[in-house]
Amino acid sequence: MTTIVLLLTVCMTWAQQSLYSRFDSIQHLDEVMVVSRYNHQEIIPSQSLNGEQLEKLSAHSVADALRYFSGLQLKDYGGVGGIKTVNIRSMGTNHLGISYDGVELGNAQNGQIDLGQFSLDNVEEITLFNGQKSAIMQPASDFGHAGSVYIRTRAPRFEQGRTYNLKVKAKYGSSDMYRIAVLYEQLMNEKLSSSLSAEWMQASGKYKFRYVRKRQDGSTAYDTTAIRQNGDVWALRTEGNLHGKLEEGFWKLKFYMYHSERGIPGAIVNNVWRRGERQWDHNIFTQGRFQKSFGNRFTTQWLAKYAYYDTRYANRDTTMLQVDNSYWQQELYLSTSNVYDVLPQLWSVSLSYDFKWNKLLSNARQFAKPTRYSNYVSLATALSLGRIKMQGSILATMINDHVERVASNMARNVLTPAFFVNYRPFDAHHLSLRFYAKKSFRMPTFNDLYYTEIGNAKLKPEAVLQYNVGLSYDKRWQYGLVRYFHVQTDAYYNSVHDKIVAYPKGQQFRWTMLNLGRVHIKGIDVETELTTVPLRGLLVTGRLQYTYQQARDVTSPDDTYYRHQIPYIPWHGGSAILNVQYRQWDINYSFVYAGERYNQQENIRFNYMQPWYTSDLSLSWRHKFKHIELRTMLEVNNLFSQDYDVILNYPMPKRNYALTMEVKI
């Protein structure tokens, strides 16, 4: 304990030195809560953006922020309310776990988490781990993902003598977009605090776009400028939290509610510019977290969650089949994680158990009404031998489905091991080398298995083998022009087996789901960051990410697309962020690039999609008067007004603007 206190004292002294840190613009030290006694150092590659960095980006939601992580591919269907999903290293969306304050977000129906529903206004940090988290204190189900994104919301912090904080934020932007967000924090006593966050957003979703279609011979079929229709959205988000401190631990309760109604503009095909599709989402979940250390060696964590998702989809387009279906999902989740230090600071072991119950109902005709019971048991260990740190785990997954229209129950049992090692060749710890090998999988979703006339109840889990080798280098300086430098690079190979694909039955308009796919993925991720102080009071920070991926379909040599790049995966992609701070002013430039790719399995000219890039620029000004802080930010997104599609026939907005006013009390 003496070592921890000394470390915190040194950190506080270092953080208070002016212009000697990459965090010079922060005028306070965030609260540090020690909840475990064992020595934890990151041995698994990760990327993160903290609250200060997220504020400066022209990002509205969690999905927007994830564009700046290497190795991730974002599917964005355009507009403020457009659906946004993400997948990791070309393995698919369902292989990426998304955790919100330590508890996984789920969607048993289709496995897709719409990250556009989660605002950044109350987010303190977003971290991406490839493989799995560096700590063995985690829920058992987290060990089963190919990668994980951890979203951590703000914990209340109060200046001396204050018992409350209030932040009000208003934003107006293109597409008739209005956002109003409020965050209120209350200190009840020295061990209990609460927070309430609420956000309302409305937009017409209309924006100009240029649309060009080419014939197979390369000639132009048509070239026009139009306005995107039926992209309106109305959304309300509320979130309440209770934060409690314990001796060597903490607890937290959360209530989250999201309501929205949106139009679905649909794909622009056959000169159809307006669709009649609409969607309503009413999502509620409540979750609790308890973590505490007992003595010098044992730490336990307990999680509980109940979620209810109500989704209604209606297609009122008179030229198409009329549909008005509702889906009701329920999820119950319980988890316990326990860590024991066999040899303090050297060897730790953990045992975790998770239970999930999922049920899906619908008013759709002949709906299967499935219920899933999932049990996860993980055993993990972490070993520290000076310059070498190792981590290993094995996860047993046992899943049973019960379906009303199927006589027999379906059971699936899977074992997935993982091994990680990190080596620091020098005592200074600036350079580290790492390697990991892991087997992971994803269960077929309810739609894959039971969707009417399409699902296949005999599907096997989609399995992935991952291999990764990388290095990272970090260095800080107290004086001079350069204050911080960081670089990390990883080379990886992934093999996806039994990939679930939609395959024609032979009858027109009839499809089914089969385990036919196999994909080999080779890639390189590079991330670097540099902080400089060219003049006193001036802080310049740059971040650069680059990804190269070769993701080839190797299902069958008889396929015309054998060894072709899989759809929507560019060979080259990356992003850059440049931030300049001077006194009360802050300028931020961000750039995202996606190289050439194909929108279908066959890599032929007709399916080719050109590279696209987008540049965003923001200027903000802060002023503090006593206990009141004012902040104004002007954003220009897609600065050069490029015409591009992330998904074919879903055009993205051209140049657009936003103005934000924020008051903190």
Image (tube, rainbow, N blue to C red):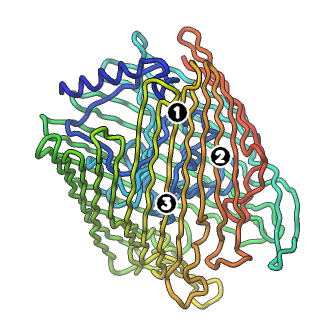
Marks 3, 2: nearer the viewer: 3
Which of the marked residues, 2 or 1, is nearer the chain's N terminus?
Answer: 1
- In-image side of 525 versus 600 (left or right): left
What x and y, as percent, mark residue 660?
A: 67, 29
Which of the marked residues, 3 or 2, is nearer the chain's N terminus?
Answer: 3
Say which residue label 1 marks: 531
Residue at screen point 78% across, 71% down: 319
Q: Nearest the camera: 49 or 458?
A: 49
Say which residue label 3 marks: 524
Question: Residue 434's quadrant in the figure?
Answer: bottom left
What x and y, as percent, mark residue 504?
A: 58, 85
Q: Nearest the camera: 221 or 414?
A: 221
Give the CA separation, mark 3 to mark 2: 19 Å
In which quadrant is the N terminus drawn? top left
In which quadrant is the C terminus drawn? top right
Say which residue label 2 marks: 591
- SS for tag 2? strand
Which of the marked residues, 1 or 3, is nearer the chain's N terminus?
Answer: 3
- SS for tag 1? strand
Residue at screen point 41% across, 51% down: 129
The amino acid on which the numbered mark 2 sits, given as a three-letter code, is Phe
The answer to whether residue 86 is visible is yes
